[in-house]
Amino acid sequence: MSDEPQSADGDVDTFAGMRSLRDGYVAVVVGSTGGLGSAMIDVLRSDARCGTVVGLSRSTGLDLLDETSIERASLTVGALHGEIDLLFIATGILNVPGVDPERSMRSWTSASLLGVFAVNTVGPALVLKHFLPLLRSGTRSVCGVASARLGSIGDNGLGGWVSYRVSKSGLNQVVRTASIELGRRCGLSVVAGYHPGTLATGFSAGRGAGLARRDPGVAARLCLGSLDVLPVGSSGGFFDAFGGSIAF
């Protein structure tokens, strides 16, 4: 049996800090009050090589539905910290309030489709617009974005949950497109989408009975560990928490 720390579902945790980044690196986590985001904050603060961790969320004034608030947050981070070395966007909703994920086409509505798309696709796109220019250009810097396997078109064999699926598919395209532009400016930088797994948080409560649920802390460590070693040539890709490629 492995001596590495394991979660309840058997995930081997080998995270030993963001070793590919400069000593004293600056990290920013958007969505820092959610299950994955708060775990990211804890993991990064425990990394002795991390100099500064900035957590941003609606409670700090960053609203994914308000671009002005996103721009204001980026200007504040830039003024206080200059360039940043790590950005992780850990935001997302499963459905709009009062509307369950769709089980069939009969339940598709414009309100649900547009509402979920606004938060899961447009919001992170605007975060990338305003925060990727802060990524350090002279040395390696990284950006991870929480996506979901349900956003994979190639992996969709069950149907259903169209608002969530479409929004995450769109997010993967946003990440891919941003990576191309970022690569022209920061040849050493990496941006990638991640499926952290089904987490043991309120987000997945009551959904997918029988599914194994990953501890958020383990998910955060797995995603960060994978992002740390992801080669520049894989920028723009879509991965599971272990760094395995997922079909778009």
Image (cartoon, grey):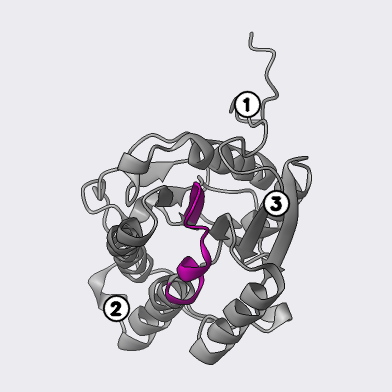
The quarter of the picture where residue 61 lies is bottom right
- Which span is picked out in magenta? 129-144
Task: Find disc 3 in the rendering and name its residue.
Answer: 39
CB contact under 8 Å: marks 1 and 2: no
- Who comes first in sequence, dot 1 or dot 2? 1
Residue type for callout 1: Thr
Task: Find disc 2 in the rendering and name its residue.
Answer: 108
Q: Is residue 219 above or below residue 37?
A: above
CB contact under 8 Å: marks 3 and 1: no
Q: CA distance from mark 3 to mark 1?
A: 16 Å
Task: Find disc 1 in the rendering and name its residue.
Answer: 14
Q: Residues within 10 Å of mark 1 (few under 14, many from 20)?
A: some
Residue 83 location, x and y as percent?
A: 59, 64
Q: Residue at the location (39% across, 78% down)? A: 122
Residue 213 visible in this rendered orientation of the protein:
no
Q: Residue at the location (66% across, 77% down)? A: 79
Discs 2/3, front: 3
Q: Residues within 10 Å of mark 3 (few under 14, many from 20)?
A: many
